[in-house]
Image (cartoon, rainbow, N blue to C red):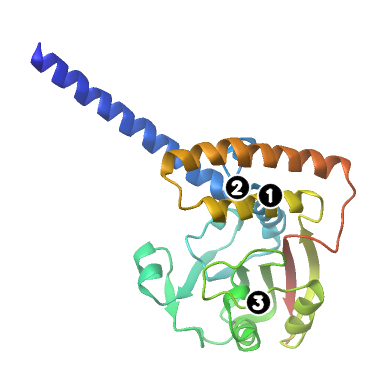
């Protein structure tokens, strides 16, 4: 009898661990690839869904050998149908431990020859660059003449990855700094230019002030409160007019015309 109870307890714990791991995988997927279920578990639903849809739509414009600058975990790799996908990231213990980047650099010169790539993607990185002119000069240098850059960068967002958060860019600011390096914008998309932006900022605020809560209360809070706010944001975005002056992120595609 005792052996039966021990075995049953062991199987119960195995089952709980299995379910927990499934939920963890589901949650992580919903962070970067939110489906309709992400409405109820992702406090950054509008920001992440907007980026996902925009990159999926315009990623098809990139081809050939592609460099992902600040690649992180390469979350959007599947949206680029290219012959070679190369990840570059800043050289530190965190990025090396992740194991995703193919090359590392110290924050100044990219470790590649001139005209090495047909395409470059740089997603949510430029705001963390203290010298954007030097950074974009490197992007243009390794990009072949006529090559394409796909760039995303926040416009409205809280400070994050402190203390390495240096800038926010308007559409006009982006055009100016890209043009200086011979990068001519062919596509510019303002992501989240509707009432949902207001609700996204509310959820971002609530997430920041509640992030220290224990795991279970935080999960309940995220599912109930943030989920309700996300639903309200969806409804508001459908019934209220868009506002192209107030939005979450920029996405641009630019040609290298050097």
- In this orientation, does residue 50 appear? no
Which residue in the protein does label 2 denote?
43
Image: 240 above or below 117: above
Image point 84% across, 41% down: which residue? 238
- First in sequence, mark 3 or 1: give its number: 1
In space, the residues marked 2 and 3 are separated at their CA atoms by 23 Å
Work out whether residue 22 or residue 229 is closer to the camera in this orientation and state it. Answer: 229
Residue 167 numbered mark, or none: 3
Image: 72 above or below 107: above
Image: 236 above or below 145: above
In space, the residues marked 3 and 1 are separated at their CA atoms by 21 Å
Q: Are marks 1 and 2 in contact (CB under 8 Å)?
A: no
Helix, strand or loop under label 2: loop
Helix, strand or loop under label 1: helix
- Residue 64 position in % (x across, y down): 60, 67
Q: Are marks 3 and 1 in contact (CB under 8 Å)?
A: no
Which residue in the protein does label 1 denote?
46
With 115 as the anchor, is 194 left or right in this view? right
Q: Mark 1: few, some, or many residues within 10 Å (few <14, many ≥20)? A: many
Q: Mark 2: few, some, or many residues within 10 Å (few <14, many ≥20)? A: many
Image point 64% across, 49% down: which residue? 203
């Amino acid at each position: 009898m005792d052996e039966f109870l021990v075995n049953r307890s062991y199987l119960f714990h195995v089952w709980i661990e299995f379910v927990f791991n499934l939920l963890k995988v589901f949650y992580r997927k919903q962070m970067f690839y939110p489906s309709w279920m992400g409405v109820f578990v992702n406090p950054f639903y509008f920001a992440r869904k907007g980026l996902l849809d925009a990159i999926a739509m315009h990623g098809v414009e990139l081809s050939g050998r592609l460099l992902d600058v600040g690649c992180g975990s390469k979350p959007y790799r599947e949206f680029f149908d290219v012959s070679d996908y190369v990840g570059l990231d800043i050289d530190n213990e965190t990025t090396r431990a992740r194991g995703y980047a193919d090359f590392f650099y110290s924050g100044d010169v990219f470790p590649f020859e001139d005209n090495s790539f047909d395409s470059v993607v740089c997603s949510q990185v430029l705001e963390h660059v203290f010298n954007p002119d030097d950074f974009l000069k490197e992007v243009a240098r390794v990009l072949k003449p006529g090559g394409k850059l796909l760039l995303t960068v926040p416009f409205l967002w809280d400070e994050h990855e402190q203390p390495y958060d240096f800038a926010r860019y308007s559409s006009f600011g982006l055009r100016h700094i890209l043009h200086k390096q011979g990068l001519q914008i062919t596509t510019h998309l303002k992501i989240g230019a509707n009432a949902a932006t207001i609700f996204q900022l509310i959820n971002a605020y609530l997430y920041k002030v509640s992030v220290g809560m224990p795991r279970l209360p935080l999960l309940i809070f995220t599912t109930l409160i943030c989920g309700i706010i996300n639903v309200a944001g969806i409804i508001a975005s459908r019934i209220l007019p868009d506002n192209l002056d107030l939005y979450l992120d920029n996405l641009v595609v630019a040609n290298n015309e050097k």
